[in-house]
Image (cartoon, helix red, strand yellow):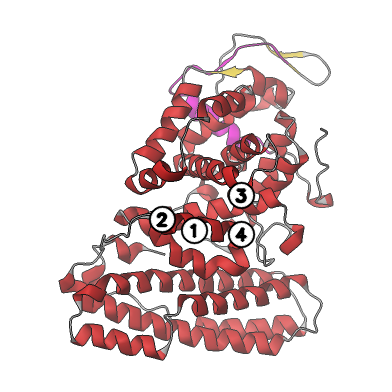
Amino acid sequence: MTATPMPFGSEAESLPKEAFCEHLRQIATQYPVQFAADVYGPSGLLVVPAGMTFGPGFMAVLSQADWRDWMQSLSWPGLLTVDVLEADFRRLVLQDRALNVFAKQHGDLMDLQRLAAHFLDNPGLRVHLTLLKSQLPAVYDQALFTAWLGLVFMRHFKRNSGDPFNVFALALSHDFGMLYLPEQVVSRRQNITFARFSVLKHHVHYGYEVLKQLTRYSDEVLIALLEHHEQLDGTGYPQGKVGGRLSRLGHLMGFLDAINALYTKRLKPGGRSLRDLIPMIQMNGHSRFGIYGKKLIEWLKDLPESTVRAVPNVLMPFLIQAVRDRNTFISASLDVLDQIAKDLGFRHGEQTVFALQNAIIHINIAITQSGIINVAYMRWLDQVETEALIHAYREVEDVFFMMQEVIYHIGKLRFQIDCYLMGDRDSSEAYKLKRGLARLERIVLPTINPALEILWIASVR
Ligand SMILES: [Fe+2]
C-alpha cells in the first residue's frame, strides 16, 4: 500500500537530524557504531564506504547521504535483538506486581517473539528502538507498556489478522519522533511552557516521517501515529480532530498512552493495583476513552480488591485537610469555568474555542462521575476525621487521587487557554477567555502540609 500524503500542507516538515545524530554520537562513546554497508547519496555517489565508524563531524557527511540508506547500514554491538526485546517485555510486565496480576488473566506474552522478530526485521526501526531504550528509557518503557496492553485489546477488538502487529508496531514506534527533538525539550523534569510545547508537539510529525520513510506500513498505522495525541472531544493536537474523524487505531493509541500515564504517575509509585484505575477511567470515560475505557473497567473489576495505603493513620488529618483544600480550589475554579462557558456561548465559529468549551464540559462530567466534590461528601469527611474512622481512610486517599485528576485537567485547560491567547487574537472570544484566565489564575492551588511531603502521594500531579 502506498504511504499517505502528509495531510498538513505547509506544516509538512522533513526530519531534522541534529538531535538524532547527537544520540548516535553518545552511543558511539560506548560502542563502535559502524556503517555495515556502503552508503550512497541521492545521485548514486558513494558517501560512506562500508566499515567506517561513526564519529564527530559525521553529521555533515551524512547530510549528503540517502537517509534510508544509512539507517539500513548502521550497526553496533548493543543493537536490540528479539531475545533482549522479549526479556524487556517480561521485565516490565512480570516484575511489576500490579501488571503481573492483570497479565495472568488477560495478557499472555505468547505471540511476542513472532511480533518482535517481525518488527526488528526492519534495520531502521531496530536502530530507533535501540536508541529509545538507551537515550529515553521512560519513553521506551511507555512504548512497551502500550504495546503489551494494545495486544490485550486486540483479542477483543481485532477486525483482521493484521491488527495485532499493527497495534504492536504502532505502540513501539509512536514516539520515535522524540529522538529528533533537542534533549532539553524532551526532559520530563521540566514544566510545560508554551515555547516547549510548541517544539514538543513536532514529535508527532517526525514519528510519522520515520514510519513513512522506513516502512511500508498501511495508511491506517501512519494515520494512527499522527492521531496519537488527538482526543475525541477535540482538545488534542495537532489537528484538534473530533469524534468520528478520529480513526479507531488512533483513538486506541491515545487511550493506551493515557492509561500508561495514569498508572505510572498515580499508582505505580505506591505499589497500588491496576484496579485503582477504575475511578480515574470512569471520570474520563465518556468524553475521552469511549468503548476502550468501558472494556478495561470490566477487566479491572475482576481483579482482587486492593488494600495498599499510602498514608499512615497518624498523618491522616493532614490528608483530610488536603482533600478539603482541594475541594475549595476545584469548586472555585469550576465557578469561573462555568462563567467562561456561559460568556462564550455557541454562536462563534472557532473550532479551538469549541474544543476549550468541550474541555470545560469534560471537567464537569469528571466531577459528576467522581461523586465526591459536593457538600455532602465534605460533611462525611468531617465525620471520618472526628470519629477517626480508620476503615474509611483508604477511600479518603482515593478521593485525593480523583481530585488530583480533576486538578490536572483544570491545569491543562488553563494551559490550553494560554496557548490559544498566545496566538495574538483580537476577537470577543479571546477577550472573554483572557478575562476568565485572569480570574482562574487568581485561584491558588493549595499546598500540602510538610508532614506529608516525605510520602509519594504528595508528589502525585
Ligand atoms: Fe507522543
Q: Are marks 1 and 2 in contact (CB under 8 Å)?
A: yes
Q: Who's the residue at 26% across and 63% down the image?
A: 310
Element type where label 2 sits in the image: loop
- At 37% from the left and 63% from the top, the residue drawn is 460
Select label 1 or label 4 by which is in front.
Answer: 1
Question: Disc 4 designates what residue?
Answer: 291
Q: Which mark, by number, is residue 298? A: 1
Residue 283: x and y in percent read: 51, 70
What amino acid type should be assigned to the residue bearing mark 2? Asp
Report the Cα–Cα distance between label 4 and label 2. 18 Å
Task: Give SS at disc 1.
Answer: helix
Please name whichever residue, 40 or 157, is drawn nearer the observer in this view of the structure.
157
The Cα–Cα distance between marks 2 and 3, rounded to whole angstroms, is: 24 Å
Mark 3 residue crowding within 10 angstroms, few (<14) / some (14–19) / many (20+): many
Helix, strand or loop at label 4? It is helix
**Residue 38 counted in the magenta span:** yes
Q: CA distance from mark 1 to mark 3?
A: 19 Å
Q: Which residue is mark 2?
A: 302
Which badge, 2 or 3, is on the more N-terminal residue? 3
Q: Quadrant of the N terminus?
A: top right
Whichever of callouts 4 and 3 sits on the residue coming sooner in the sequence is 3
Identified by mark 1, the residue type is Glu
Q: Earlier in the sequence, mark 1 or mark 3?
A: 3
The residue at 77%/19% (across/down) is 41
